[in-house]
Image (cartoon, rainbow, N blue to C red):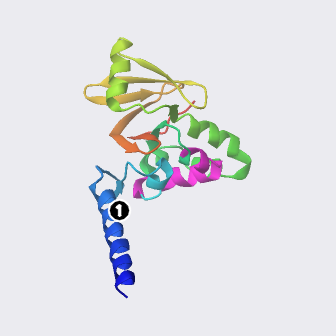
Amino acid sequence: MKTAFKAAAAALSLAFVATGAIAAEKTVMVGGAAMYPSKTIVDNAVNSKDHTTLVAAVQAAGLVDTLKSPGPFTVFAPTNAAFNKLPAGTVDNLVKPENKGTLTTILTYHVVPGRLTAKDLAAKIKAGGGKAELTTVQGEKLWASMMGNTLMLTDAKGGTSHVTIKDVLQSNGVIHVVDTVLMP
């Protein structure tokens, strides 16, 4: 009986330690949810109320396993409001199975290999004389610059997006929340 009690007490204390370790992580709030650095990009994004469209698009494109892999990746994550800026019906059309290729192209244009924090991006921008050229997982270029204290991205079509929440660290990279969908 004492042995069983000790084992149960040990298991319970380990559970408290594990829970405390997660609670002790330095989190960033995104879409009303804490983003834990010990979780993957996907495991965190599914909890953000502001990224339900992005999560649905990632699922429709079949990119969940990729974004749960070790990476590391830098993801410029458009909010629901960013997707709402697109012409009416665009998102509904993109998530159709017959448009998976186009959807994948757009989503992978928001991903850069490696873990680039805002500090890393600022250093690249400074080294580039005010502009940093980034090559996306999709293969095309994306440019980062500063507009005052705000990190700004310019896509291949000349559209711009601003980073609204930076440095959301993940176990397999970093997310920077953006206010506009980038187009290759």
User: In this rendering, is residue 108 above or below 2?
Assistant: above
* Coordinates of residue 90 in the picture (x, y in percent): 59, 47
* Coordinates of residue 14 in the picture (x, y in percent): 35, 67
Disc 1 secondary structure class:
helix
* Coordinates of residue 115 in the picture (x, y in percent): 44, 33
| Residue 32 seen in the current view | no
User: In this rendering, is residue 56 above or below 151?
Assistant: below
* Residue sitting farthest toward the right: 98
- From the viewer's perspective, tell me whether residue 65 is left or right of residue 120: right
* Coordinates of residue 167 in the picture (x, y in percent): 34, 39
Segment tinted magenta in the rendering = 48-67
Q: Quadrant of the C terminus?
A: top right
* Magenta stretch: helix, strand or loop mostly: helix
Q: Return the residue nearer the eye: 64 or 30.
A: 64
- From the viewer's perspective, tell me whether residue 100 is left or right of residue 5: right
| Residue 144 seen in the current view | yes
Residue 93 is covered by the magenta coloring? no
Q: Residue at x 34, y 78 (%)?
A: 6
* Residue 146 placement: quadrant: top left
Rate crowding at label 1 as few (under 14), some (14 to 19) or many (20 or more) other CA atoms within 10 Å. few
* Residue sitting farthest toward the top: 129
The residue at which mark 1 appears reads as 18
* Residue 180 placement: quadrant: top left
